[in-house]
Amino acid sequence: MTRLRACVPILFVCLAAAPAGAQNRTELQLMAELRMVHEEVQRLQANINAIVEQLKATNTRVDTQSEDMRKGFANQNVAIGEIRNTLGTLSARENESAVNVSRLTGEMKSIRDGLTIQQTMLNNIISLLQTPPDPNAVTTPAAGTPPTGAPPPATAPGIPASPSSYYSAAFGFYAATKFDEAIEMAREAIKQFPSSPDAPRAQMTIGESYYQLGKFKDALEAYTAVITSYKDSDQVPDAYYKQGLAYQQMGQRAQARASYQYVIKNYPDSVARTLAEQALKKIGGAS
């Protein structure tokens, strides 16, 4: 269009210089051509305007779709986060249920054993009641019968002790600051019921009791037993942290620092991680 506008003055100059007859014909022809060019320019301008409007509409649709997609992704992220939280809660509940089922299984075994003993005792009593005494029999003390005046023998055992009775006793001794009794009872509980879900905590209680008694080497061995014997237990992060405390009490700062750093690196979501960071800052060392 710029070129056409530049050519218009030149055309008028040419028309002025041409003869009159030829000038009229040429002028008419040029005017006709100029009208055609002007109409073509108007059509092109209309097409350009239409294309510009289409581009604006397209850009609007693209912006709207982009905003919708952004909102959709944001909503999906929120939904995924909620699903992840729900799965975490369900997983925690499942683990808790599994622990409770394991505890109940141990309790049921003790109850079944006790019922078996009670049934045996009842059968013996019924048998004795149904057998009439022999009047001609001479009563002589049986071998092993305590002499007259001795205390009566212990009564037959009833329901055997359950895992919870052992472990609860150990935890109760520790809560009452009876650390020697807590160690003894926790060891006996682990010995009697090694597969109980409370066994890792009992082993941890042994370490805690030794630590409170100032026997840091024994405490360190007990914490190490938690790590080696119960690798999948939730007590392991605390055991590593308490390892660091025991090392620190024994003056072994490098080993303490290594234990703290291990907790920070491998158990970032645990409470022990926060405690380990605080302990590490006190003795100096990058986390």
Image: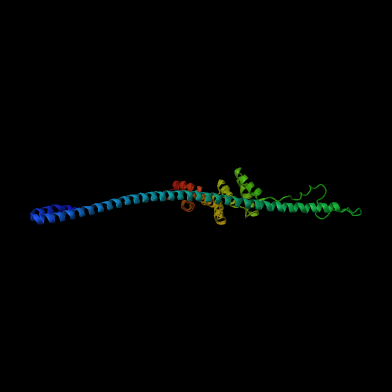
92 relative position to 29: left or right: right
Number of numbered discs: 0
127 relative position to 264: left or right: right
Q: Give x and y (percent) for residue 233.
A: 56, 53
Q: Name the colouring of the figure.
A: rainbow
Q: Choose between 111 and 169: the one closer to the eye.
A: 111
Q: Choose between 230 and 21: the one closer to the eye.
A: 21
Answer yes or no: is residue 245 visible: no
The residue depicted at 74 percent of the width and 52 percent of the height is 115
Please identify the residue farthest to the top as the structure is shown.
176
Q: Give x and y (percent) for residue 11.
A: 13, 54
Q: Give x and y (percent) for residue 272.
A: 50, 48
156 relative position to 81: left or right: right
Answer yes or no: is residue 61 visible: yes
Q: Give x and y (percent) for residue 18.
A: 8, 56
Q: Choose between 125 and 44: the one closer to the eye.
A: 44
Please identify the residue farthest to the right as the structure is shown.
136
Q: Choose between 86 and 144: the one closer to the eye.
A: 86
